Image (cartoon, rainbow, N blue to C red):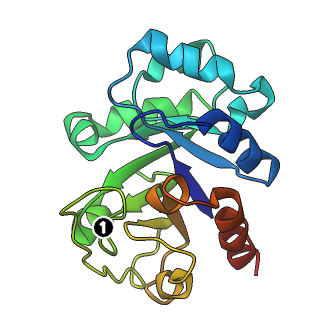
Amino acid sequence: MIIVIAPEHDIKNEIVILHELFHEGLQYYHLRKPHKTYTAYEVYLNQIDSKFHNRVVVHQSHKLLDDYNLKGLHFQETKRRTLTLDTFQNLRDNSTITISSSFHSPNELTNCKFNFDYYFLSPVFSSISKQGYEGQEFNVNHINKTVIGMGGVTTKNLTVFDKLGYKGIGVLGSIWNSETPVEDFKIMQKHYKN
């Protein structure tokens, strides 16, 4: 499972690259632009071919789900901690969307009472896109959940994520900072198809 996370700030040719990634088979695009307003999110989504909206998961402005056929909702760690189990269960009961969340501790992830579709755990390795975000090399082989490893993902360390027990990767810097983002995605995709 490969999840591509949007760059925090818009970059040159971002939508063009995103469409290429979708055409290559990207199924999970996490739209995380914390500085955008609701209207700016709408402008961004309207630039994406609507046939790909069902591959987009939003981190903020969850009400976009009312107007767009989106894949799901993601809850940042801070937001998740403020919500009740009933809130998540109500979402699950009334929708077919994916629901995911971020974690920075294997223990907190293991003890989470709600069954998210998948769980981000970071930083596995030192982040490419965030300075000072030092890797912890979390081993999740003992956790019976769909844990997605984030932090320091490259085309060269995918097998290490496998050995640590991750069911997939969340990538940001290794795609958006790359000179060859689509080619790098294809290498990752080939790894996860094997």
- The reply, left or right, for residue 22 in relation to residue 70 is right
Query: Could you say which quadrant of the image residue 123 lies in?
Result: bottom left
Q: At x 67% / y 21%, what residue is drawn?
A: 47
In the rendered image, the vertical position of residue 48 relative to residue 127, given as above or below: above
- The reply, left or right, for residue 101 in relation to residue 112 is right
Q: For the residue marked with disc 1, what is the amino acid?
A: Pro
Q: At x 28% / y 71%, what residue is drawn?
A: 106
Q: Position of residue 149 (x, y in %)?
A: 43, 68
Disc 1 element: loop
Residue under label 1: 123
Q: Is residue 96 visible?
A: no
Q: Position of residue 131 (x, y in %)?
A: 23, 59
In the rendered image, the vertical position of residue 48 relative to residue 171, given as above or below: above
Q: At x 34% / y 34%, what residue is drawn?
A: 86
In the rendered image, the vertical position of residue 143 relative to residue 75, given as above or below: below
Between residue 144 and residue 130, name the one nearer to us.
130
Query: Could you say which quadrant of the image residue 85 lies in?
Result: top left
Q: Is residue 117 visible?
A: yes
Quadrant of the snapshot with the C terminus? bottom right
Local packing at callout 1 (Cα closer than 10 Å; few below 14, some 14-19, many 20+) is: many
Q: Position of residue 127 (x, y in %)?
A: 32, 65
Q: Position of residue 143 (x, y in %)?
A: 40, 76
- The reply, left or right, for residue 104 in relation to residue 124 is left
